[in-house]
Image: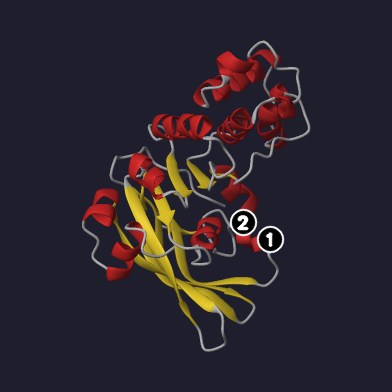
Amino acid sequence: MMEQVAAPTKTETVFQLENCDIYYGSYKAVRDVTMAIPRNQITSFIGPSGCGKSTVLRCLNRLNDLIESFSLKGKILYHNQNLYDADIDPVEVRRRIGMVFQRPNPFPKTIYDNIAYGPRVNGFKGTKDEMDEIVETSLKRAVLWDEVKDKLGESGFSLSGGQQQRLCIARTVAVEPEVVLMDEPCSALDPISTLKIEELMMELRQKYTIVIVTHNMQQATRVADKTAFFNAVPTESGGKVGYLAEFNDTQEIFGNPAEEATRDYVTGRFG
C-alpha cells in the first residue's frame, strides 16, 4: 500500500531517482539516472530521439510494467517510498501519478462521461450533484469549461485537437492525482492550442507537480522550472544507450550549461 502524502512544502522532492538502469530484456536502454524532481514545479525532459526521455517518464508511474521485457535496476522513490517495492500496487501508483499522452485520446464517450470515468472506476459513491461538481471543477482546471458547458452530452471526439488534449488533462485531474506526467502533449497541436496548453501547465503547477517530455526547446524555456537533458551514446552491439547528461534550473541548462553536449544540443548543433 502507498502511504498518504503529508502537506506540501514548496521545495519538497517528489521523486528521487537513484542509479537507475532501464532494460528491455538484456538490452540496456538507459543507464545510471540519478535526479530529484521537486514538488509543485514543472520539470522538462529534453534531448534527441532515442535518448530515453519517455522511457524514464513512464517509469515514474510504472507504465513500463506493461511491457513484458521491461526491468529496472536502482530505485525510484516517491516521497521516500520505493515505487517498485513488491507491496506497491501499480494501479494505485497510476491514480496518484496521472499521464497525458502525445496525441489526444478521449474515450468514445460524452464529454461528461470522459471526466466521470476515472472517479467511477475508483469507486465514487457520491450523488449526481457531487459528480456534476467534479466534472465542472475538472473542466475549469483544464480551462475548458466555458467552451463545453453547453455540450457535455456530446462526444469527446466532437472537439478540436487542442480541446481534446485539454479534455484529457481534465480527465487526468478528475481523480485528484498529485503528479501529472505529459509525454509531448503539444506535438500534435497547432501553435494556438500549444500556447493554451502551456498556459494551462503554468496554472496547474500551483496544485500539481508536472513532468513533461518535449522536443520543443522553446517550450521548455517557457514553462519549465527544471530541465533534464538526456543524450545517447552508441553501444558495441550497434544500438545506443540513453543517459542523463545534465539536470539543473532551466535557465542554467539553456544559458550556462555545464556539459559541451548540452550546449551543442540547446544551440541546435545536433538533435
Residue situated furthest top in the rendering: 150
Q: Quadrant of residue 244?
A: bottom left
| Label 2 secondary element | helix
Give the vertical position of 257 relative to 42 (above or below): below
Residue 11 coordinates in the image, percent (x, y): 28, 45
Task: Name the residue tied to disc 2.
Answer: 63
Name the residue rendered at 44%, 43% in the picture: 210
Dot 1 and dot 2 residues touching (CB under 8 Å): yes
Give the quadrant of the C terminus: bottom left
Name the residue rendered at 32%, 58% in the picture: 267
Identified by mark 1, the residue type is Leu
Task: Name the residue tied to disc 1.
Answer: 66
Residue 2 coordinates in the image, percent (x, y): 53, 50
Name the residue rendered at 50%, 84% in the picture: 235
Name the residue rendered at 33%, 50% in the picture: 226
Front one among 122 and 101: 101
Q: Quadrant of residue 135?
A: top right
Question: How much space separates mark 1 and mark 2, taking CA atoms?
Answer: 6 Å
